Amino acid sequence: MESRAHSEKPTCAVETALKVIGGRWKVLIIRELFQGVKRFGELHRAMHGITQKMLTQQLREMEQDGIVHRQVYLQVPPKVEYSLTPLGESLKPVLNSIHEWGIQYEEGKTDHFAE
């Protein structure tokens, strides 16, 4: 299965990464899944402001891109759990770096970024 990120020819690797994790919600979903397996309702409650429709759409896109694994349990009522794939887990150092950058930016340590 070809991922969405490769269906259009990106101009660089950064563009490819942003196609996979870009947008308002994907990084926040990934952050929640770093904590472990979550059911849809747990994710929805943890992410203030996201609609169920948007969460569903984002999870489907990330599943298609190989970042998220969706496990369906055939029972009544149906149970669905989401977790990160190894590819999704590989984003941890990237997001940790973004987190650290955000802290420095918020603290006004722009001199830290000077050349």
Image (spheres, rainbow, N blue to C red):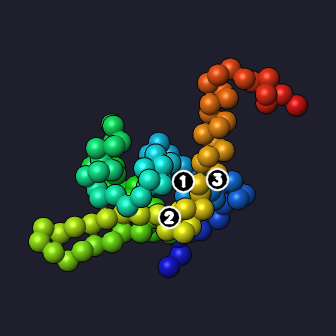
Q: Residue at x 55, y 58 (%)?
A: 20
Quickly name the residue at label 2.
67
Q: Quadrant of the C terminus?
A: top right
Q: Residue at x 66, y 27 (%)?
A: 105
Viewer-closest of 80 and 5:
80
**Residue 61 picture quarter:** bottom left
Crowd band around label 2 with a 10 angstrom C-alpha radius: few (<14), some (14–19), many (20+): many
Q: Could you give the CA–CA distance between mark 2 and mark 1, rounded to whole angstroms?
A: 9 Å
Residue 60 in percent (x, y) is at 38, 63
Residues at discs 2 and 1 in contact (Cβ within 8 Å)? yes
Residue 2 in percent (x, y) is at 53, 75
Q: Is residue 41 above or below residue 112?
A: below
SS for dot 2 = loop
Which residue, as the protein is rendered here, is positioned at the far front?
35
Quickly name the residue at label 1.
21
User: For the residue marked with disc 2, what is the amino acid?
Assistant: Ile
Q: Is residue 14 above or below residue 85?
A: above
Can residue 11 be seen in the rendering of this structure? no
Residues at discs 3 and 1 in contact (Cβ within 8 Å)? no
